Amino acid sequence: MHTLEIVPRGPFSLEAATTFAGGFAASIGGGGATPAGIVMAFPVEGWAGSAAADVGQSDDGVVHVRIATTGSPSADAALTQVARTLSLDHDGSGWPAVGNRDPVIGRLQAKHAFLRPVCFYSAYEAVTSFVIGQRIARRQAARIKAWLGDQLGDRIDVDGAPHTAFPRPQRLLELREAPGLNAVKVERLHGLAEAALDGRLDTERLRSLPIERAMDELMGLKGVGGFTAEGTILRGCGVVDELPRDPLNREAIAELYGLETLDDAAWTEITDRWRPYRMWATVLLRVGWERAEPGRSYRHRPG
């Protein structure tokens, strides 16, 4: 076990992160919430192995991470993914100022402990999750991901408890069939595995690109449309100041700000207040809006 730590810049609550999107494991991937924090299980980029990270937070705010690995990934590479998943790789010291400028954001920050977005472990896990989930229910997609982990993923023990990661791309290429996956989806997952192995899905590389170029690259992969590409960039790469194009965001803003209509001018005026944390503010708004009426975000999802 490697013991490392992350000192958050700005307010951060690990407890708030464990409740993101209705529960950490169901939303993100292998692992899950524990009485003391979170265990994350994931393939480490570079694909030399997988890691399980036992994450806790002390009273002084420091995030403590114990990392176990299988194969030969570096603990530092695993820690990079942990930090990025929890949006701890960004300086959040200016995040409270957004709430000072915008009372709606301020109320939600107070209610949800300055929640930061919780992201997928990598662009690879994000895009494969979106492709698996196309045109099926979230619970079915979660069962498929769990089955793939059990069959092809690495198992990592933490304090005697086993945790299973999503398959590394080279293992995903071994997949021939799976309950709930048709032949087209299997073929698409193979294409995504190949893209991960040749570097096209490298998370930091995608995050460094202008969003339109990153979108174009991702949409060049079979099975990846605009919704999946944008979700991969925003929730897989952990950007901070992009604005999702999902029309449900406008519906959420209109309701929370008490507006009958939200034209482009009002949209721009409101979202400009959130700079340079527009993605964080959007996620926080969606969390508040969704929790007011659970489930409504998923009623009309594109495939």
Image: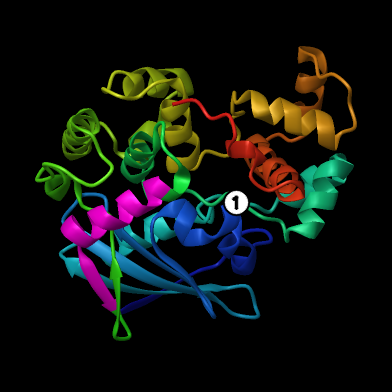
Task: Give how far across and how far down residue 22 sits, in percent.
Answer: 59, 56
Looking at the image, which is closer to me, 303 or 280? 303
The residue tagged 1 is 91
Furthest toward the top, the residue is 264
Q: Badge 1: few (under 14), some or many (20 or more) residues near its Cα, within 10 Å?
A: few
The residue sitting at 77% across, 21% down in the picture is: 267
Q: In this view, does 101 lie to the left or right of 212?
A: right
**Magenta stretch: dominant secondary structure:** helix
State which quarter of the image contains the C terminus: top left
Q: Which residue is drawn at 89% across and 26% down?
A: 259
Q: Quadrant of residue 78?
A: bottom left
| Color theme of the render | rainbow
Q: Is residue 85 visible?
A: no
Residue 69 location (% of width, % of height): 24, 70
> Is residue 178 visible to us here?
yes
Q: Position of residue 126 (x, y in %)?
A: 38, 42
Q: Is residue 303 magenta?
A: no
Up the image or down, 132 lies above or below 226; here it is below
46 relative position to 268: left or right: left
248 relative to 65, above or below:
above
Q: Relative to residue 139, is residue 191 drawn left or right?
A: left
Identify the residue at image location x=59%, y=61%: 17
Q: Is mark 1 on a helix, strand or loop?
A: loop
As rendered, which of 264 and 246 lies closer to the eye?
246
The quadrant in which the N terminus is found is bottom left
Kind of residue indicated by mark 1: Asp
Tell me where the magenta segment starts and ends, as one range. 140-157
Labels in figure, total: 1
Of all residues, the one furthest to the front in this rendering is: 179
